[in-house]
Amino acid sequence: MAQSNFKSPARMGSLGDGASAASAGAVAGGAKGPGPKGADFERRNFLGMVVAGAGAAVAVSTLYPIVRYIVPPPSTVKEVSELVVGKAADIPPKGFKIFQFNKDKVLVVNDNGKLTACSAVCTHLGCLVRWESAQNLIFCPCHGAKYQQTGEIISGPQPKPLSPYKVRVEGEDIIVSKA
Ligand code: FES
């Protein structure tokens, strides 16, 4: 069995006068002050700062993308009062199309050449509505809300009518504007 280098106080006593305190691992002289202990303290202090800095860097690099993901960037889309959304040929007679207009989506219906426009976002829970030409109404497929072509409520759970918009054709362009 390997012999231990540990020197117990009892064993220190048995070493006799020839065994100096230095040989037993003690610091010679017993002087206090900025000797090896001070250097050790500064090293520990420095290492503590390095570890704390590294921890802070890891925390920031981990949290930054999460915060960027959660907090939406400031909107750079400029609000306009009217917009060319497409070509008249895009919407066949009895057809419809949904266009982006500012932050809203607008449903443009071509009722045999007469265009109407209103918000395409159902006022119940926000599903997109569609034009049902066979029934001559706007329908929400989520919970069955029904609206007239100009957005007024026919039936369903929706609390409000669809917001109205103006629409006109200039040349070949469909132009949507705020009502
Ligand atoms: S979201 Fe349209 S009826 Fe519920």
Image: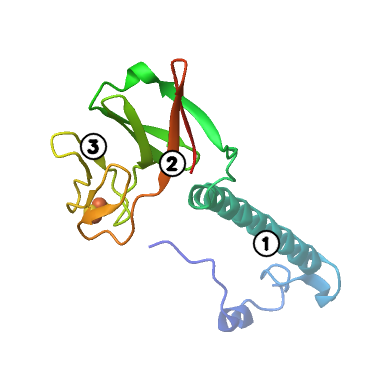
Which residue type carries mark 3?
Trp
- What residue appears at the point 56 percent right and 50 percent down from the top-left corner? 64
Q: Which residue is mark 1?
A: 48
- What residue appears at the point 26 percent right and 25 percent down from the top-left corner? 112
First-in-chain label (1 vs 3):
1
Q: Which residue is mark 2?
A: 165
Viewer-closest of 36 and 4: 36
Number of other residues with Cα within 10 Å of mark 3, as a class: few under 14, some 14 to 19, many 20 or more: many
Number of other residues with Cα within 10 Å of mark 2, as a class: few under 14, some 14 to 19, many 20 or more: many
Label 2, label 3: how far apart the Cα atoms are: 16 Å
Which residue type carries mark 1?
Gly
Is disc 1 placed on a helix, strand or loop? Answer: helix
- Left or right: where 145 falls relative to 83: left
Label number found at residue 131: 3
Viewer-closest of 133 and 62: 133
Is disc 2 placed on a helix, strand or loop? Answer: strand
- What residue appears at the point 57 percent right and 45 percent down from the top-left corner? 73
Label 1, label 3: how far apart the Cα atoms are: 67 Å
Identify whether 144 is placed above or below 22: above
- Left or right: where 175 falls relative to 112: right
